Amino acid sequence: MIRSVLFVLWIYGTMVVLAFAFLPGMLVSRRFAVWAVRFWMKNVRWSLRVIANIETEIRGADNIPKGPLIWASKHQSMYDAFVPWLVLSHPAIVIKRELLWYPMFGWYALRTDMIAIDRSGGSKTLRSMVEAAKKRMNHDKGRQLLIFPEGTRVAPGSPPQYKSGVFAMYKGLNVPVVPVANNIGLCWPAHGIRRRPGKVVIEILPPIGPGLDKQDFMAKLQNTIEPACDRLLDEGLAHQGRRRSDLQTEPS
């Protein structure tokens, strides 16, 4: 817990310091704002290793195609939204609109042109989300989009609950979808400040090309991500000296 508290203090402390230090450059240049966000994300990865004793391994980077794409990731932790900044040039992340109201975070989300949505908007939200993604891909050639197919964070080993928003993006944008599996929640849970030492693995899987119908696409996406997550779950638990039964009996 001491390491966990120190890690949380460090990442939020450096966020405040860097957000104000980089503010003049961010206001002048969006490219600088992107660089600033990536710099802080690298700081998070470094501090995870040094302070919290958590390694990060990214596998399968050669599966990322050139040009625009949709990064469809399992969502177990806030760290899932950080990892794409380590491997993609300028991801556009679908975030809930309320995050724009947060000091510092909201400033940089606006400046780097994230896609903020009203999660209670239903089909209207889906349409606006697709249109916003199209504008960003047309404006910045080759820009990538990050979306979480389940829409919210889930605990490792939980039953999958994929939602139709990812298919709306897939159909509307007509670009490859890159499935991404991980076991991040074993070390950085969805809630609380405790960080468990271990090794998180993010595995970038072979892309799904455009053109599939909804049923085939959703089945292929889930059947690609979930077996990989199960494998990474067992690998991560073994690294920590835990078993699946411990996920139900140990506090998060």
Image (cartoon, grey):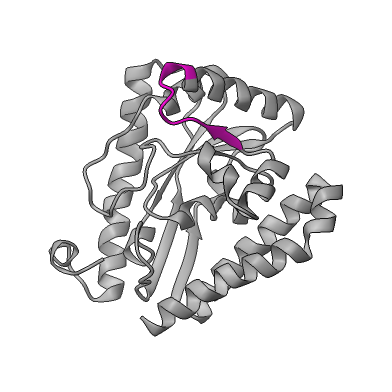
Q: Tell me which residue sits at (30%, 73%) in the image.
A: 239
Magenta stretch containing residue 116, yes or no? Answer: yes
Is 152 situated left or right of 32 in this image?
A: left
Magenta stretch containing residue 141, yes or no? Answer: no
* Residue 86 coordinates in the image, percent (x, y): 61, 56
Q: Tell me which residue sits at (55%, 20%) in the image.
A: 128
Q: Observer-nearest residue: 246 or 181?
A: 246
Q: Residue furthest bottom?
A: 2
* Residue 8 coordinates in the image, percent (x, y): 48, 72
Q: Tell me which residue sits at (32%, 33%) in the image.
A: 162
Residue 247 seen by the camera: yes
* Residue 34 coordinates in the image, percent (x, y): 73, 50
Q: Tell me which residue sits at (37%, 24%) in the image.
A: 164
Is 240 situated left or right of 248 in this image?
A: right
Task: Point out the stretch of residues depicted in magenta.
Answer: 115-124
Query: In the image, is residue 64 above or below residue 17?
Result: above
Query: In the image, is residue 245 above or below residue 117?
Result: below
* Residue 217 coordinates in the image, percent (x, y): 38, 24
